[in-house]
Image (cartoon, coloured by chain):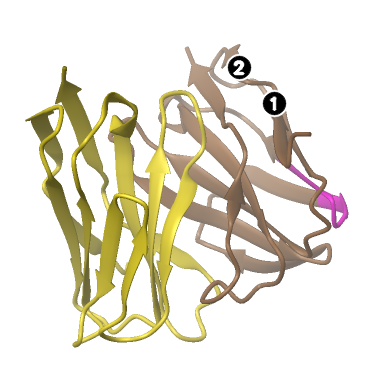
Chain colours: A brown, B yellow
Amino acid sequence: DTAVSQTPKYLVTQMGNDKSIKCEQNLGHDTMYWYKQDSKKFLKIMFSYNNKELIINETVPNRFSPKSPDKAHLNLHINSLELGDSAVYFCASSHTVRAETDTQYFGPGTRLTVL
Amino acid sequence: GQQLNQSPQSMFIQEGEDVSMNCTSSSIFNTWLWYKQDPGEGPVLLIALYKAGELTSNGRLTAQFGITRKDSFLNISASIPSDVGIYFCAGDIQGAQKLVFGQGTRLTINP
C-alpha cells in the first residue's frame, strides 16, 4: 500500500493556466507538507498543515493555495502559472508537527512543466 | 533564509569504495537527518540523529551529529550500485517546526 500518494505524476501546461496537485496519505498522520524541488535539486518547504490548519507558509506567492479537506489530504492549487513554477513538487506527512522527532514520509513527486 | 552547506555536490567513485559527505550550518540544530532520493522518487529517511556527538549506523551507513551541533557527516562503506542517488542532509531548528535541507550530494558509482 502506498503511504503518501500524489496525482498527477507529470503535469505539462501553458503559462497562465490554473492547475491542481492532489496528495493523500494513509498513515494516519496529523501533519502534511508541500515541498518544491528546483532544477538544481534544492528542496524547500512551502507549506505545512496540522489537522487541516495551516502551520507554515514560507513566503510562497499567493498564487499557490493549499487546501486540506481532511487531515489525510492536502491539495495544492496554483493560479496563473509562470515559467518559474516548473519544478518537482513533493508532498510529505509526519505523525505530528514536531519536525525534530517525527519522520517525514515523502510522496513520489509531481513534475510540473510550464511552457 | 537558513541554509545548510552540503559537500561535495557530486561524487564519482568505483564500486567497493567508501564514501564520505558532510553538512555544516551557521546555526545550532536539534536534529540532523540524512535522506536518500532515487531518480523519480521522493526522499527516504536513512538515519536520524538527535544528540550532539551521537554516532549511528544503519547497515553500511554511519552518520554522526557534530559536537558543536552545527555539522554532521554521513559515511557509506563498500559502496554498491544501488547506493547511486542523491543524498540530502536536513536539520531542524528548535521551535521552527520545519526541516531545512542541504543542496544534496549526487553519488555516481562506476561498476
Provide residue B93's location: percent of width, then percent of height: 41, 79
Provide residue B80's location: percent of width, then percent of height: 25, 30
Chain at tag 1: A
Residue beneath disc 2:
A11
Along the polypeptide, which appears first: circle 1 or circle 2? 2
User: Residue, x 39% and y 43% (percent of image)?
Assistant: B36
B39 with respect to A45 (left or right): left
The reply to whether discs 1 and 2 touch (Cβ–Cβ < 8 Å) is yes
Question: Residue B20 in magenta?
Answer: no
Number of residue marks:
2
Label the magenta part by its dominant secondary structure. Answer: strand
Stretch of the chain drawn in magenta: A68-76
Residue A77 figure quarter: top right
How far apart, in angstroms, are the residues tagged by discs 1 and 2? 9 Å
Chain at tag 2: A
The residue nearer to you, when weighing B76 against A26, is B76
* A26 lies above or below A50: above
